[in-house]
Image (cartoon, rainbow, N blue to C red):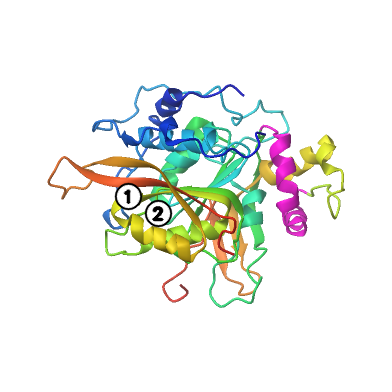
Amino acid sequence: MKKLKLKELESCLQQVDTFENPKLLLEQYPTRPHIAACMLYTIHNTFDDIENKTIADLGCGCGMLSIGSAMLGAGFSVGFDIDADALEIFNSNIEDFELTNINMVQCDVCSLSDSMSETFDTVIMNPPFGTKHNKGIDMIFLKTALQMAKTAVYSLHKTSTRQHIQKKADEWDVKMEVIAELRYDLPASYKFHKKRSVDIEVDFVRFSAKKLLN
Amino acid sequence: MVGTSKPAPLNHVPRSMTSSPLRVSSPRHGCPVTVVTAVQSGAAPLSPEVTQTGGGAGMKLLTHNLLCSNVRGLRPGGGFPLRIQASDVSVRPVPFNAAFVARLVPRLRWGALLEAAESLGHPSELPPEPAPDYEGDEAFLRRVHHVLLEVEVLEGFLQCPDSGRQFPISRGIPNMLLSEEEA
């Protein structure tokens, strides 16, 4: 398989259709193609956690991370999201890109069965941060991800929560590695945003363990 | 496949990756779809017997093999396997990836896979258990590939074995949302 360059990957991901009317309460915004490409490229080239692996994308939205994973040779990806509108866009993206190794499930990630232990090699996600009357949701996503993953979980979390997450990771006997610090240039996607964009510091984290949950 | 790699030092990845400046997203009218040539996935040429559906992929049996009912209060293991009642099944060619399928075989819930394929009218022609030398048996791996990845459920229901609760599948997407009382 020809090696896909970072720039090529980013360029492809710029073609991914995203939310038409992002839902405020679900914290919907697309993972920016540049960030998604850098994340996925690292996961693939540094850690080899994408090619020929099964991947779960929790809170997949329009599928940016799943689609990027498919482009890097994922064996099979499944996206999970609560919102039918987002999944419809994801579905049409899959059709446009002619991808055949992606599925999606509509569900509340917070209510996923806890019997799905180690069902995927890798979980890659950009979870909601818990800023919209849903405090703590990032940790529920993380815990679920750790149950579902066999090898590693890659996730984005606010830098301000790093210490809290580290504590939890220790509790859960999970190794936490901050791979990079990002600055989110969140576009003013919601009408009430006064500034043109909001800067948030975000950690790109890899979780793994001798023993993941369960 | 490459053996386990130690994490590279952080100078492989920019320490601080600022995202590109704000760009207003515009509709894709007139933009040609980028065809990615480097990728394994992508529809293979169709053979006459196979129906190609429009729309994204239907639910594959690999997904079915991984999914458990999330109804509360089930007995341990009572949420798997979900029973498939399909009203629209199709077959979509998917490029065969022997290495990937071979990796999957030991992790599949084999009985559930065979049962699911039967119930869809696509009997798998697979043995009750994988043979010990399955890794080198391409014909076997191709049959596994076919039922796991090429048979799709577009419309129907998944039924929780313990509770009987039905989860609809529409346009290939299972809907496992629980009502407020159920959650």
Which stretch did the figure color magenta? B95-122
Asked which secondary structure carries label 2, the reply is: loop
Give the percent coordinates (x, y) of residue A126.
40, 48
Asked which secondary structure carries label 1, the reply is: loop
Q: Name the residue under label 2.
A: A83
Looking at the rendered structure, the kind of residue marked 1 is: Gln
How far is mark 1 from mark 2, CA to CA?
10 Å
Asked which quadrant contains residue A88, the reply is: top left
Dot 1 or dot 2: first in sequence order is: 1
* B87 vs B109, nearest the viewer: B109
Give the percent coordinates (x, y) of residue B19.
30, 34
Instruction: Decide if residue A28 is on the left or right side of residue A2.
Output: left
Looking at the rendered structure, the kind of residue marked 2 is: Asp
- Report if the CB atoms under discs 1 and 2 are less than 8 Å apart: yes
Q: Is residue B173 visible?
A: yes
Query: Which quadrant does the N terminus of chain A fall into?
Result: top right
Relative to A212, say whether A193 is above or below. Answer: above
Considering the whole magenta stretch, tell me its main secondary structure: helix
Furthest residue to the front? B9
Relative to A54, say whether A108 is above or below. Answer: below
Give the percent coordinates (x, y) of residue B64.
64, 55
Instruction: Decide if residue B141 is on the left or right side of residue B84.
Output: right
Q: Which residue is drawn at 31% across and 64% down?
A: A135
Relative to A76, say whether B20 is above or below. Answer: above
